[in-house]
Image (spheres, grey):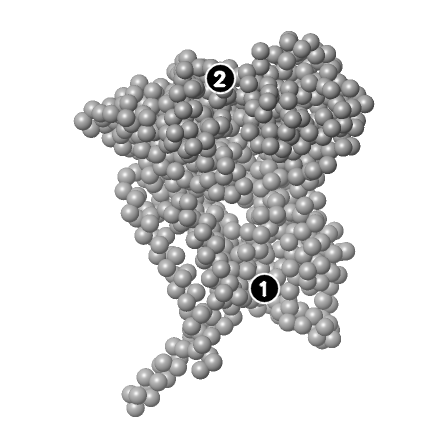
Amino acid sequence: MKKSSRLLPSLLSIILGASLLAGCGGGSTSDSGGQAGESGGSSGGGEIVAKIGVVSFLSGSGAAYGEAQKAGLELAQAELNKANEGKLKIELLFEDSGGKKESAINAVNKLINQDNVVAIIGPTLSGEMFAAGPIANEAETPIFGISNTAEGINDIGEYVFRNSLPESIAIPTAMKKAVDKLGLKTAAFIYAANDDFSVSGFQTMKKTAEELGLENLGESTFSIGDVDFSAQLTKVKELNPDALLISGLYKEGSMIVKKARELGIQSTIIGGNGFNNPKVFEIAGDAAEGLIVATPFSPEKQDEKVQAFVKAFEEKYGKKPDQFAAQAYDALYIMSQSLLQAGEADRNKLRDALAQLKDFNGVSGKLSFDENRNPIGEAVVVVAKGGKYVPFE
Amino acid sequence: MDLFNPYNLQVITFIVLNGILAISIYITLATGQLSLGHAGFMSIGAYVASILTKQADVPLIFALLLGGLIAGVIALLIGAPTLKLHGLYLAIATLGFGEVVRVIFLNMEITNGALGITGLKSIGSTLYDWLKVTGLTGDSFGLSVLQMKAVLTLLFLLLLFGLVLFLTLRLHRSRIGRAFEAIKADETAAKAMGLPVAYYKMLAFIIGAVLAGFCGGLFAHITTTITPDDFNYHKVVEILSFAVIGGSEIVWGPLFGAFILTTLPEVLRVLAEYKMIMYGAIMVLVMAFRPHGLIGTDTFAKLFDRRRKQAARQAEEGM
């Protein structure tokens, strides 16, 4: 009797395992009809049907970014399918990467080989793009980054695109404008040494400072997760630079801004791309006043297109869009424009059309690609005023 | 199921890779040591192999082996002071080791800090280049270049996995394996029997570390990019959960755990947002019904036992 009562659970778990196996087999057969050669839907009856895959950070620590991207894409999809009715129908297939490389690789492989998408938008993180980009490139499928700002993304291959301005464009724009307007002479740096995004931002800042002739008074580092920055900031106070340049994520960055003002540091603070988050004002409060940041997108920008997008987004989701939603929104518009130009849902034709993109006018500014498919665009320089970012004049 | 679809091949490749990792954690656990340093050893192997192939143009296989060996040497140095610790204390010490390794890699020049190493040549590409020398291409087998690379990667990993599994099974039946088992059951008794406990524990620790380092090299050359963050605390938990879910009594346990935990996220893709809920629920169910893991020494025994009883009963009825 005792024996059988212990046997039941063990059998149950084996059944569980077996059912998983069965699920695996079944799920894959149903979808793997077509082969990789013929891709992404048909163009029968004049209407192009294009399947576009999206790999995004939808669960885990960075889910906020993924959700914003998904919202932006879905809004664009609804608008585009209505506007291009009879000409182009876009289907979006979302896959979660959870911010993990293996998962991003699997997702990209699945979209290309099983779902036969014509192109992929994403993945969210630069690290994921470095892992998944080469796979799409080898499979000759365009992959379009909408939030990868690291250096070297475009060097992966000919099929890799992005509309997210690399930090090497955004940060210098902000620094240059600040130096011009405020006549800054000296600078001190503080950055998160254990975060790839922040380190890459810092390197750009340092290079730009040299080019602009800003005197480098000192560099200090912190780690993501730190809460006390007094030691580093006391040093900065002694140096008394004209500009304090911070490269970090919004949480630590905002705390540094707050602490710096508490210690009485009067320098102009210029932040990296990490500061493009409304949470900055929640954490830093009044101390954020005067903070200068470059952003690809500002919902406050007085532009017809931007305001229409902000209104539509607020109606649908009940909140203001951030840069991630805006860049995702633009990416789908670029895709549809290029698909219409290509005339059919073909991976190679779409790639060629994308490579020719010129003067695309989106909500995150004008965009063209240079011969290496690097985005050429403009960043908006904003300054914190009264609890929000307003264009810096 | 379309076997030659690169997506399926990729998932199977990750299953096999995690299978080798599962064996590495199993061997350390076989002496009753709970080590949380596997992600650390993995990162050492990954960085050593990557730097060797990328900057010194060392052939892939030597780079992988060297990565594993160096992880083993580090394990020897770390093991000397820490293996005197038991249970939870050892876990904490090795966890600390893993974090230290990660922070060192974050701050080193040659590892490119937090930005990591990118643009490594994948295993598939390396093997395909070798194959081309012999005059064979994908066309010879009726496969595309992409499929061919995926197939080659998988074959390479399967070969390694088979070798490691074979050696592990042999080890289990050897004198060393019996010693491991005795130490796991009761360390004091094993010592009283005259077994050099410290030696065997160190041996298990080092074998585990070498395998983990080897896996690190493989991981780096499958994903083609590594950053220190790939080997953080989450990776430790992932490796350990192979043994927790699958069971750590026999080698099939962690292997089954690795299989389940690698397949599950892919199978559950269909569920999109509800994926993580299902994933969690399945974990809880497993823990509720099988707290020692899905597969234990009793699993096979019971299945066979039952069949034998049935056979006996049928024989009786027949008489």
Return the mark for residue A255.
Answer: none
Residue B46: image x %, image y %? 60, 42
| Residue B228 horizontal side relative to residue B273, left or right | right
Please, what secondary structure does the residue beneath circle 2 have? Answer: loop
Residue A240 vertical placement versus A61 (above, below)? above
CA–CA distance in space, label 2 to label 1: 69 Å
For image coordinates 67% across by 10% down, the residue present is A182
Q: Quadrant of the C terminus of chain B?
A: bottom left
Viewer can see residue B27: yes
* Foreground: disc 2 or disc 1: 2
Give the amino acid type for the residue marked by disc 2 in the picture. Answer: Lys
Q: Which residue is mark 2?
A: A301
Q: Nearer the viewer, residue B21 or B147?
A: B21
Residue B309: image x %, image y %? 39, 82
- Identify the image quadrant of residue A96: top left
Residue B57 vertical placement versus B72 (above, below)? above
Q: Which residue is mark 1?
A: B171
Residue B209 vertical placement versus A83 (above, below)? below
Residue A101: image x %, image y %? 51, 40
**Mark 2 Cα shell of 10 Å, populated few (<14), some (14-19), many (≥20):** some
Looking at this view, name the residue that lies furthest to the right.
A238
Label 1 marks a residue whose chain is B
For image coordinates 18% across by 27% down, the residue present is A45
Looking at this view, name the residue that lies furthest to the bottom.
B319
Label 2 marks a residue whose chain is A
